Image (cartoon, rainbow, N blue to C red):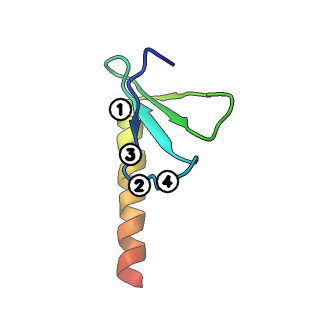
Amino acid sequence: MSAYVWQKSSYCAQGEACIHVAAPTPGTVDLTESADPTGAILHTTPTAWSALVRTIKEDRTRETSSS
């Protein structure tokens, strides 16, 4: 994983369960989770990553407005 420049999620609190994101080459987005002892990396596309982030933000907005 040394070739990756990982960025830790801004929602990560102190601890060992954080999502890290990297874009090692154009057209790829890679994700890993800090508590995973295997160091598994999920590979996806910028389009799929954007759709996931958009969906999460929409769900958070709905939860906040219904409270």
Residue occupying the point 39% across, 73% down: 62
In this view of the protein, which residue sits in the foreground, 48 or 43? 43
How packed is label 4: few (under 14 Cα within 10 Å), some, or many (20 or more)? few
- Asked which quadrant contains residue 33, the reply is top right
**CB-based contact (under 8 Å), mark 2 and mark 3:** no
Q: For the residues carrying marks 3 and 4, which lies nearer the camera in this image?
A: 4
Circle 4: element type: loop
Please tell me which of labels 3 and 4 falls first in the chain.
4
- Find disc 4 in the rendering and name its residue: 14
Q: For the residues carrying marks 2 and 4, which lies nearer the camera in this image?
A: 4
Q: CA distance from mark 1 to mark 2?
A: 20 Å
Q: Is residue 66 above or below residue 20?
A: below
Query: On the rendered image, what quadrant is the C terminus found in?
Result: bottom left
Q: For the residues carrying marks 1 and 2, which lies nearer the camera in this image?
A: 2
x, y percent for residue 18: 51, 46
Q: Is residue 54 left or right of residue 17?
A: left
Please tell me which of labels 4 and 1 falls first in the chain.
4
**CB-based contact (under 8 Å), mark 1 and mark 2:** no
Q: CA distance from mark 2 to mark 4?
A: 10 Å
Q: Is residue 66 above or below residue 56?
A: below
- Find disc 1 in the rendering and name its residue: 46
Q: For the residues carrying marks 2 and 3, which lies nearer the camera in this image?
A: 2
Which residue sits furthest bottom? 67
**CB-based contact (under 8 Å), mark 2 and mark 4:** no
Q: CA distance from mark 3 to mark 1?
A: 9 Å
Q: Amino acid at mark 4?
A: Gln
Please tell me which of labels 3 and 1 falls first in the chain.
1
- Find disc 3 in the rendering and name its residue: 51
Which residue sits furthest front? 14
Q: Amino acid at mark 1?
A: Pro
Residue occupying the point 55% across, 51% down: 15
